[in-house]
Image (cartoon, helix red, strand yellow):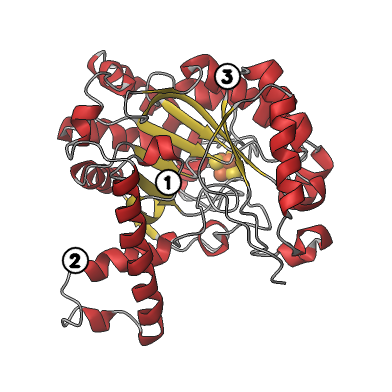
Amino acid sequence: MGGGVCGRNNGLTSPLMFNKVLQAVSKPLFSPGWPCLPKWTRPKVLKQLLLYYLSTILSIYSNWIPANSSEAMASSKPAYIETSKKGLLKEKIARAYEILKACTLCPRGCGVDRLSGEKGFCQTGEHAIVSSYSPHFGEESPLVGSHGSGTIFFARCNLLCLFCQNYDISHEGEGVTFSSGEIAKAMLFLQDRGCHNINFVTPSHVVPQILAAVDKAVELGLSVPLVYNTGGYDRAETLSILEGVFDIYMPDFKFWDPKVSEELCEAPDYPEVAQEALKEMHRQVGDLVMDGEGIAQKGLLIRHLVLPEGLAGTGQAMRFLAKEISPNSYVNVMAQYRPCGRASEVHALRRTITQEEYQEAIQAAHKEGITRLDERKRVFLFNWI
Ligand code: SF4
């Protein structure tokens, strides 16, 4: 997350469990609402509650800004407001839904009619499935600030890495069908809680539904920037529809070698597609720009998960970012790989990375001239398979 070890969840909190936590905290503990949770989840819920409050307190302590986060963002208006005013948002929605009739929204190019209920590789029909929505404090610091990033996790995925940390959500589709109106309400819910942005996690297969939700949310008063938090397997043509809607792109750049991406997510074209997607994203929004409080306002933030045995091709990936995107790219070189899902099917993926592997990755970034590296504390998880 934008995800999982794919980069879309830092592993601190499971999105599905987090929703249960939110449901629990909305009622007094041990009230009649508490028994709604199965008994086996209660210790987990308590643990998640503890982590949630701990991360919130730490975040506020280390990075305090005024309570009304919208004020902090007031200096720049998100692009979608102007796009909506000009009537362009509705045009974009129509274009995007048209694609669903013979779906080529993403590079899988399934050609199925999703509006008639057919499903392709992503197993998603006309409507989006939402796994959870909540303020999230485990994202990169420019997104989190003091009040969190307002994440909306979509179930299913167009990439489906076999080692996905959110396997139950991405592969098995755990979640609830949401209309665009319901997604819009979730966005307002997160904004009302002071989140600095709305962060769509795994959005590539539900672009039309997101656009329709943004349109409704604007009418309801949405005013914080939007984050497109993707695995990086996005068609440049689809991304072009998003110009003037998303201010912040946060793609993974996962693999350099087509053989690796073929083995790990049945997508030999991933490296080529992701490179084109990164170029298109950077063309639209440029390098990451933050306000005086260090909160992201606009730009590109790239995630790269270091894999054991050099499987991610970190050196080549960093060279590409420095030479073909920008040496001023903001990059999160992530250390938190741990074996999940079907990772045990690939020998090299049965362990976490070593300190040495991570240091080599950081050195590779420096060597290529990438100096804007996300500075959160690195968490190392050693072999547990
Ligand atoms: S969005 Fe889904 S159905 Fe459409 S091309 Fe991609 S994987 Fe296939």
Q: Which residue is drawn at 54% across and 15% down?
A: 283
The quarter of the picture where the C terminus appears is bottom right
Disc ID at residue 134: none
Q: Does the residue at mark 2 contact the one at mark 3 (Cβ under 8 Å)?
A: no
156, above or below 342, in the image: above
Mark 3 vs mark 1: which is more N-terminal?
Answer: 1
Task: Inspect the image, locate mark 1, and give the three-letter code of the amino acid beneath it.
Answer: Glu
Q: How far apart are marks 2 and 1 (CA)?
A: 31 Å
Q: Which residue is drawn at 15% across and 74% down?
A: 28
Apparent side of residue 197 relative to residue 259 in the rendered image (left or right): left
Dot in front, 2 or 1: 2
95, above or below 35, in the image: above
Observer able to see residue 112: no
Percent x, y for residue 322? 68, 20
Q: Does the residue at mark 3 contact the one at mark 1 (Cβ under 8 Å)?
A: no
Which residue bears the numbered disc 2?
26
Q: In which quarter of the image is ligand 1?
A: top right
Dot in front, 2 or 3: 3
Helix or strand or loop: what does disc 1 sit on? loop
Apparent side of residue 203 relative to residue 182 in the rendered image (left or right): right
Q: Foreground: 136 or 270?
A: 136
Which residue bears the numbered disc 1?
126
Q: Does the residue at mark 2 contact the one at mark 1 (Cβ under 8 Å)?
A: no
Q: Foreground: 149 or 353?
A: 353
Which residue bears the numbered disc 3?
328
Helix or strand or loop: what does disc 3 sit on? loop
Asked whether mark 3 and ligand 1 are closer than 8 Å, the reply comes as: no
Percent x, y for residue 314? 74, 37
